[in-house]
Image: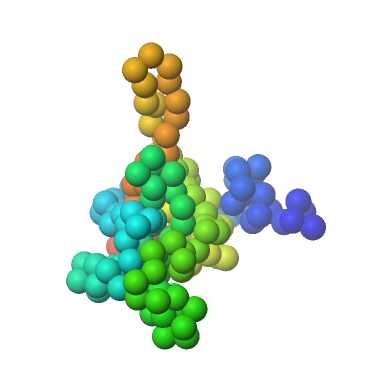
Amino acid sequence: SKFLNDKWMIKNGFLNDVQEHKPWWWNIKVQKLNLSASLILLPEVSCQKAIEILQEKGYDQAPVVAESGLILGMVTLSNTLTSVLAGNAQFSDPITKVIYDQFSKIGLEDSLGKLSCILENDHFAIVVHEQMQFNGNGSSFMKQMVFGVVTAMDLLIFVSRNDKK
């Protein structure tokens, strides 16, 4: 059962620290990774334009975010190319036809240990930041802003550069 799986419990925020012998970086916050701002695609971008943008900017993946700020999913260069070549999508189709709508989110204040648990099963996580916004009548609501995308390679580079020998 997933409720008996400590890694699932950490990934989903039910447990904080379960490792007795944590690596030195386990409790460091995700914000210390110094990620660069993520490229974001709007849902109406075509598959062809998304491929061009990702290749031109040197990205393998990008979040797809509605103008309202709702995170719709992730698009990857390889999945988009594969879908178009297989005939499951056309170059002219909106990118929403080929997005991954199952993805993990992690906050800037979360630990690298939690990130490590997420990256054991997922290729990436979307780094989000909660921001309070107010509308015209003064009522407020929390909005998630995409801060970046983090991969296992980002974590590995951080650990290897800062390794406490």
Residue 156 shows up from this direction: no
Q: How many marks?
A: 0
Q: Looking at the picture, how far across and down is residue 42, in whole percent?
A: 33, 54
Left/right placement of residue 27 relative to residue 5 reads: left
Q: Residue at x 26, y 51 (%)?
A: 37
Residue lying at 32% horizontally and 61% vertically, measured from the top left:
45
Protein image colouring: rainbow
Q: Could you tell whether 113 is left or right of 161 in the image?
A: right
> Given the current orientation, which residue lies at the most extreme top position?
138
Toward the bottom, the furthest residue is 85
| Rendered location of residue 86, percent (x, y) | 47, 85
Q: Quadrant of the C terminus?
A: bottom left
Please say if 23 is above or below 92.
Answer: above
Q: Is residue 91 visible?
A: yes
Q: Nearer the viewer, residue 44 or 147?
A: 44
Can you say which quadrant of the picture contains the N terminus?
Answer: bottom right
- What x and y, as percent, mark residue 128? 41, 44
Residue occupying image coordinates x 35% and y 75%: 91
| Of the pair 130 and 160, the residue shown nearer to us | 130
Q: Residue furthest left?
A: 56
State whether residue 77 is above or below residue 4.
below
Q: Quadrant of residue 151?
A: bottom left
Q: Residue at x 30, y 73 (%)?
A: 48
Which is nearer the eye, 21 or 94?
94
Residue 47 in percent (x, y) is at 35, 70
Give the side of residue 150 with respect to residue 5, left or right.
left
In the rendered image, which quarter is residue 31 located in?
top left
